[in-house]
């Protein structure tokens, strides 16, 4: 069979096409091909010509014209165009360079912590859709969060993203740009959609809070809100430093961070945001030698390292209390100082990402491990 022929056609109409599969039907006579039109973005249509097998032909059944000049995504409301930058703004993020002529006005936020960051920077009204629609935002962001269209319980599909005609997609985890789901950064880039990934998931870990400051600075430049972005990163860094100052002089508490797993426990390693939280909260991470943000271990090793406190990450279908009950009943963990003393600290997983919630998680853990130093902050 000959290779498909692809032509790009620019027009002012949005085509809606419905296909009907029919067997033993004669192929299109024009070059023995069927033509399908797929609207991808404002004023742009791809025309795809493909030869069909005579045994299973696909023919055009309905082609309806929608309002001339209407773009996909305008159903969620028009957005005023932004004034162009004096000079194009280019940023290199996770080894990918993106250039912007003007601040993005139609943003898709793939993760709830990303949504909170954008809201705090003053760009919440530019978000035309967000993933993780069942997320519970912090109270101060609840009103703004409620106004944003929720695309999916988890990640939106490639089609949902394209349907909104975004000029920026921001992800807070590598899974936001899953290649298998057709929404890799490269794939979206081919459609003219720039992307940004929080560097926590670039593969280099989270060496220090400077990574967050760099990301927020770049976002501020892209969005045209540099002062607001600096203010957000300043609040995070000053909040973390305030806790560190309070616990200065205290001995770090050997701590096991329990993510999940009954047969094989999953904990935090020594290069991710979890380790940064532990360091600022006065917790000696039992697996600081781990070369990944999260590492698997064994109950025997954990028992040998005798944790004096356990931080339980709360998320998913297994509740924090269920995890605690499991640890209390475990033959090895039940003998550790932490379980014997009932020294558990529950922290939402939402507070373990590259976001202002870092301060909240550090405060929670530090208060539990060093109550005399932190007090009732």
Image (tube, rainbow, N blue to C red):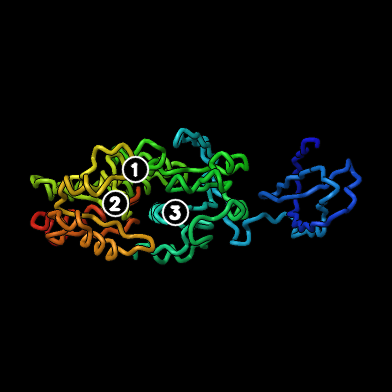
Which quadrant would residue 70 be assigned to in this image? Answer: bottom right
Mark 1 vs mark 3: in front? 3
Look at the picture and state if 234 lies above or below 93: below
Q: CA distance from mark 2 to mark 1?
A: 11 Å
Label 2's element?
Answer: helix
Image quarter where the C terminus lies is bottom left
Packing grade of label 3 (10 A; few <14, some 14-19, many >=20) is many
Dots 2 and 1: beta carbons under 8 Å? yes
Residue 62 location (% of width, % of height): 81, 60
Front-most of residues 334 and 339: 334
Look at the picture and state if 69 lies above or below 174: below
Residue at left offset 53%, top offset 60%: 151
Packing grade of label 1 (10 A; few <14, some 14-19, many >=20) is many
Residue at left offset 84%, top offset 49%: 55
Residue at left offset 48%, top offset 53%: 109
Mark number for residue 111?
Answer: 3
Residue 234 visible in the snapshot: no
Residue 5 location (% of width, % of height): 78, 38
Residue 2 location (% of width, % of height): 80, 35
Front-most of residues 43 and 305: 305
Residue identified by numbered label 1? 212
Front-most of residues 97 and 330: 330
| Upstream in sequence: badge 3 or badge 2 | 3
| Upstream in sequence: badge 1 or badge 3 | 3
Mark number for residue 358?
Answer: 2
Residue 259 visible in the snapshot: yes
| Upstream in sequence: badge 2 or badge 1 | 1
């Amino acid at each position: 069979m000959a290779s498909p022929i692809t032509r790009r056609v620019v027009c002012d109409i949005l085509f809606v096409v419905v296909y009907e599969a029919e067997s033993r039907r004669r192929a299109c006579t024009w070059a023995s091909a069927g033509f399908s039109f797929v609207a991808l973005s404002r004023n742009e249509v791809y025309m795809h010509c493909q030869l069909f097998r005579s045994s299973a032909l696909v023919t055009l059944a309905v082609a309806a014209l929608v309002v001339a000049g209407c773009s996909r995504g305008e159903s969620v409301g028009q957005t005023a165009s932004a004034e162009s930058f004096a000079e194009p703004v280019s940023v290199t993020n996770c080894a990918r360079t993106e250039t912007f002529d003007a601040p993005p006005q139609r943003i898709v936020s793939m993760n709830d912590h990303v949504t909170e960051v954008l809201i705090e920077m003053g760009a919440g009204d530019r978000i035309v859709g967000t993933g993780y629609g069942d997320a519970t935002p912090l109270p101060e962001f609840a009103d703004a969060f409620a106004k944003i269209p929720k695309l999916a319980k988890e990640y939106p599909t490639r089609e949902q993203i394209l349907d909104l005609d975004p000029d920026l997609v921001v992800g807070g985890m590598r899974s936001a740009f899953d290649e298998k789901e057709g929404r890799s950064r490269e794939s979206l880039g081919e459609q003219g959609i720039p992307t940004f990934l929080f560097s926590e998931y670039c593969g280099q870990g989270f060496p220090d809070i400077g990574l967050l400051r760099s990301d927020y600075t770049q976002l501020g430049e892209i969005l045209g809100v540099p002062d607001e972005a600096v203010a957000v990163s300043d609040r995070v860094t000053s909040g973390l430093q305030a806790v560190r100052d309070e616990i200065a002089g205290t001995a770090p508490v050997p701590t096991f961070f329990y993510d999940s797993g009954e047969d094989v426990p999953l904990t935090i390693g020594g290069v991710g945001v979890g380790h940064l939280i532990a360091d600022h909260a006065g917790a000696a991470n039992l697996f600081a030698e781990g070369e990944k943000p999260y590492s698997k271990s064994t109950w025997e090793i954990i028992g040998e390292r005798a944790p004096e406190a356990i931080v339980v990450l709360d998320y998913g279908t297994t509740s924090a209390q269920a995890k605690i009950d499991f640890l209390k009943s475990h033959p090895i963990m039940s003998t550790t100082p932490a379980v014997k003393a009932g020294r558990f600290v529950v922290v939402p997983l939402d507070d373990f990402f590259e976001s202002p919630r870092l301060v909240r998680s550090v405060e929670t853990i530090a208060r539990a491990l060093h109550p005399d130093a932190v007090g009732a902050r």
